[in-house]
Image (cartoon, rainbow, N blue to C red):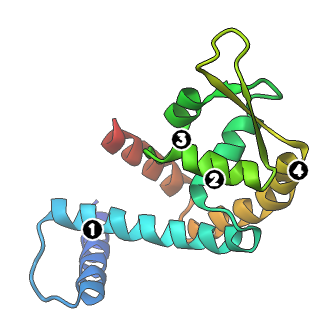
């Protein structure tokens, strides 16, 4: 037990040193700040990795997210507010984002027959084809991003991140 605790402490000190090297500081940061910075750095790394996969397709992460949301509807249309609520990254310019997807012929828009003020969105066949090509690339990138973690560490990470976001 003592050896296990010492190993854990040693690993913690190594990670703190790594963060200090990344930030080019010798100042001892509070644990809360280290956690926040590490989350932000990890977020940037994940985003950059996924964006590299989406770049050849001319898609942003948010556009990709919208396509996946609409595909999940299995052909049923979804209104703009519902799309926005389901997005991973909440943003105010969803209308402009949707307009770009419509221009690319990946999404189609039509007026709701029951409420003319509502707009219904659905993914096109081209959008579905695009996702079939992109999905394996994103899956591989996601696996690569967490490849240094064991299955148990992944479960623990997911639990902790869910706890932070709750």
The picture quadrant where one finds residue 1 is: bottom left
Find residue 71 and report its horizontal and vertical position in percent.
Answer: 77, 37
Give the residue number, with chain letter if any, for mark 4.
Answer: 126
**Residue 119 in view:** yes
- Measure how far apart labels 4 and 1 are at the Cα level: 39 Å
Judge the density around disc 3: few (<14), some (14-19), many (≥20) Cα neighbours within 10 Å.
Answer: some
| Element type where label 4 sits in the image | helix
Q: Residue at x 56, y 43 (%)?
A: 95
Dot label at residue 37: 1
Quarter where residue 113 is shown: top right
Residues tagged 1 and 2 counted as in contact (Cβ below 8 A): no
Q: According to the image, label 3 marks what residue? A: 87
Q: Which mark is residue 63?
A: 2
**Badge 4 local density, few (<14 within 10 Å), some, or many (20+)?**
few
Q: Residue 60: where, in percent of width, then height?
A: 61, 62
Which of the pair 85/121 is nearer the observer? 121
């Amino acid at each position: 037990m003592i050896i296990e605790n010492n190993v854990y402490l040693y690993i913690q000190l190594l990670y703190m040193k790594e963060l200090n090297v990344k930030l080019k500081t010798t100042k001892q940061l509070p644990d809360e700040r280290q956690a926040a910075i590490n989350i932000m750095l990890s977020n940037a790394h994940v985003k950059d990795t996924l964006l590299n996969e989406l770049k050849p397709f001319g898609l942003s992460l948010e556009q990709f997210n919208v396509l996946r949301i609409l595909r999940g509807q299995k052909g049923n249309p979804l209104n703009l507010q519902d799309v926005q609520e389901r997005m991973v990254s909440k943003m105010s310019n969803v209308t402009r984002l949707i307009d770009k997807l419509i221009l690319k012929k990946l999404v189609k828009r039509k007026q709701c027959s029951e409420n003319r003020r509502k707009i219904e969105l659905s993914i096109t066949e081209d959008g579905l084809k695009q996702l079939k090509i992109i999905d394996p690339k994103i899956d591989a990138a996601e696996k690569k991003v967490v490849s240094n973690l064991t299955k148990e560490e992944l479960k623990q990470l997911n639990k902790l991140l869910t706890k932070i976001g709750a």
